[in-house]
Image (cartoon, rainbow, N blue to C red):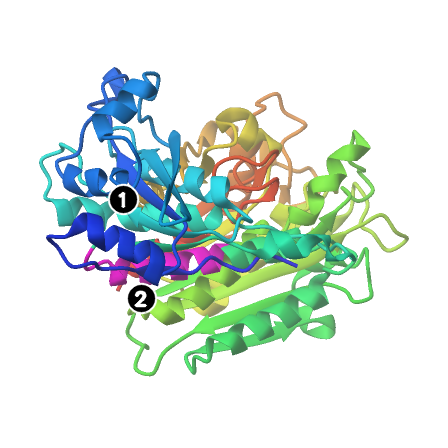
């Protein structure tokens, strides 16, 4: 089970009587905590705390205690208001305990607000507290409303995501942890930002639910049922789902080669289409997601064995595109979208593919398989070829936890992005910077193409026989062969798709990376 998502609302108090209004809010709205965003003058001078221009509200909040703002800072001289730093003050008023959090937002950049939101969400996770948040402008030259509107969405989304949890305990032990903290925002005119934050955070929560589900529950057939359930839940007539299995996958040689290691239930290609009435002339985007519901490495068994523990998350790409296409039914961009979830299990069995097998991908390209643990590119190649040959996309994007090489090069913060289309890559990077799903444009190095040459087939699927290394690059070059002349982007999310610890807006496990990026990028095509 997962925690319930926190409730986010607005609370607009009458101006002119701040102290009385805040005291009244604590009582009438049953609030437990007032959170006040506090900036420092600059990142370079984090020791110099900025007293906000809207200090009357701070003074009103502190009036419920025995301190003024300046006196508070004198009592805690090491408080620097760096992003996510929280100073907690406790007092009583009319017999009610009052907590005030001075929440650092650093230099008030978008990333600072995201860090602050995550820090607050993590601090109050499971507490059931009711919170009033005040967001203030920094000295950036922007007006108060413009500053708040550009940053509040990131703050609230991070706040919500930091409270995510998933567990399958049999006792009542988990019940107390399901009490997420609700928040009211004391800032006018934020309804659109709150609504968008709800859409983004719900989509990421959905992706995380899919990723965190154990693989003894989650298989390709289960993924198909979840896709049907999520599509039905949108109540959108523009969204349809269809599933290919068995004989209907006869031409999908890569998906069958991997997925037939578990003949029952066998592999699935799940196709979800978003096509509102009158959308035939709109741009068509096809998203292809790797959906390996568990990956042992197949006959080329993973070493060391404990690296398999995280492999229930090897369908994170499919989870991201399914959650994204369901979410856009609420934003209604003028774009047609097809999501292809290429789902299979990669297991060790008598029907598993072998190193040295030659398979025929969708469209007829033959591929020599030399490492069965490089299965993701085989299922993606089928999806890309099917999209190119049958769906005529204007944009073709695949998302996959594909290579360890990507995380070796870029770490856990950035996904590796490959594309020949510089404008498209730049736009995705720009959107990623706004959503926090960071991507780095990597080179498709043609000098490495000989790594894909096979003596017996059209292609070999890994470049191990050469000494180029650059495993993420050669994997992308392989996938490019199946994308035709489309405006294609490959997102290798192996690094940021999983978190090794609870930190920021993540819990240990699947992060839902790329979900927000896809939603917001699709919205730009409207």
Foreground pick, 278 / 132: 132
> What residue is disc 2 on?
283
Q: Which residues are magenta?
A: 188-204
**355 left or right of 430 in image:** right
Residue at x-position 52% and y-position 74%: 231
The location of residue 397, given as percent across then percent down, is 44, 53
- Left or right for 373, reference 199: right
Q: Earlier in the sequence, mark 1 or mark 2?
A: 2
Please state which of residues 401 and 19 is positioned toward the viewer in this rendering: 19
Q: Residue at x 68, y 68 (%)?
A: 249
Expressed as whole percent of the image width and height from the top left, the position of residue 29 reads: 35, 61
List the residue tagged with mark 1: 423
- Looking at the image, how many numbered discs can be counted on the residues? 2
Among the 4 quarters of the image, the one containing residue 92: top left
Instruction: Reply above or below: 328 against 438.
Output: below
x, y percent for residue 374: 68, 41
């Amino acid at each position: 089970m997962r925690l319930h998502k926190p409730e986010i609302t607005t609370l607009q108090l009458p101006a002119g009587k701040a102290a009385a209004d805040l005291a009244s809010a604590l009582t009438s709205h049953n609030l437990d905590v007032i959170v006040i965003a506090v900036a420092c003058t600059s990142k370079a001078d984090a020791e110099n705390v900025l007293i906000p221009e809207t200090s009357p509200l701070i003074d009103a909040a502190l009036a419920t205690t025995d301190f003024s703002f300046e006196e508070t800072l004198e009592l805690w001289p090491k408080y620097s208001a760096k992003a996510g730093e929280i100073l907690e003050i406790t007092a009583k008023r009319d017999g009610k305990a009052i907590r005030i959090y001075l929440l650092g937002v650093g230099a008030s950049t978008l990333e600072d607000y995201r860090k602050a939101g995550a820090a607050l969400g993590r601090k109050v996770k499971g507490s059931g507290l009711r919170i009033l948040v005040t967001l203030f402008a920094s000295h950036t030259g922007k007006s108060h409303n413009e500053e708040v509107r550009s940053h509040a969405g990131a703050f609230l989304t991070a706040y919500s995501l930091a409270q995510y949890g998933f567990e399958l305990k049999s006792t009542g032990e988990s019940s107390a942890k399901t009490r997420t903290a609700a928040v009211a925002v004391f800032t006018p005119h934020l309804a659109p930002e709150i609504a968008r934050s709800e859409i983004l955070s719900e989509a990421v929560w959905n992706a995380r639910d899919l990723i965190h589900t154990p693989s003894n529950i989650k298989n390709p057939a289960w993924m198909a049922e979840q896709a049907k359930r999520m599509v039905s839940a949108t109540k959108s007539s523009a969204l349809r789902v269809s599933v290919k299995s068995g004989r209907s996958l006869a031409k999908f040689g890569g998906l069958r080669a991997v997925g037939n290691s578990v003949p029952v239930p066998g592999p699935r290609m799940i196709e979800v289409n978003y096509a509102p009435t009158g959308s035939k002339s709109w741009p068509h985007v096809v998203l292809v997601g790797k959906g390996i519901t568990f990956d042992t490495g197949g006959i080329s068994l993973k070493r060391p064995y404990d690296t398999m523990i995280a492999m229930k998350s090897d369908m994170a790409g499919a989870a991201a595109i399914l959650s994204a296409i369901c979410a856009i039914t609420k934003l209604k961009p003028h774009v047609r979208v097809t999501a292809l979830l290429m789902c299979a299990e990669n297991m060790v069995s008598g029907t598993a593919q072998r190193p040295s097998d030659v398979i025929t991908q969708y469209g007829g390209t033959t591929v020599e398989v030399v490492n069965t643990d490089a299965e993701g590119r085989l299922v993606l190649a089928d999806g890309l070829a099917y999209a190119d040959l049958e769906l005529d996309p204007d944009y073709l994007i695949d998302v996959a936890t594909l290579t360890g090489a990507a995380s070796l090069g870029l770490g856990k913060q950035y996904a590796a992005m490959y594309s020949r289309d510089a404008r498209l890559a730049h736009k995705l990077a720009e959107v990623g910077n706004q959503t926090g799903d960071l991507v780095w444009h990597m080179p498709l190095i043609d000098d490495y193409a000989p790594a894909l040459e096979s003596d017996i087939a059209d292609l070999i699927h890994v470049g191990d026989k050469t000494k180029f290394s650059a495993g993420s690059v050669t994997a992308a070059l392989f996938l490019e062969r199946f994308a035709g002349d489309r405006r294609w982007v490959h997102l290798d999310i192996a690094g940021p798709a999983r978190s090794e610890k609870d930190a920021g807006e993540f819990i240990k496990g699947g992060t839902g990376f790329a979900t927000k990026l896809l939603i917001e990028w699709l919205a730009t095509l409207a």
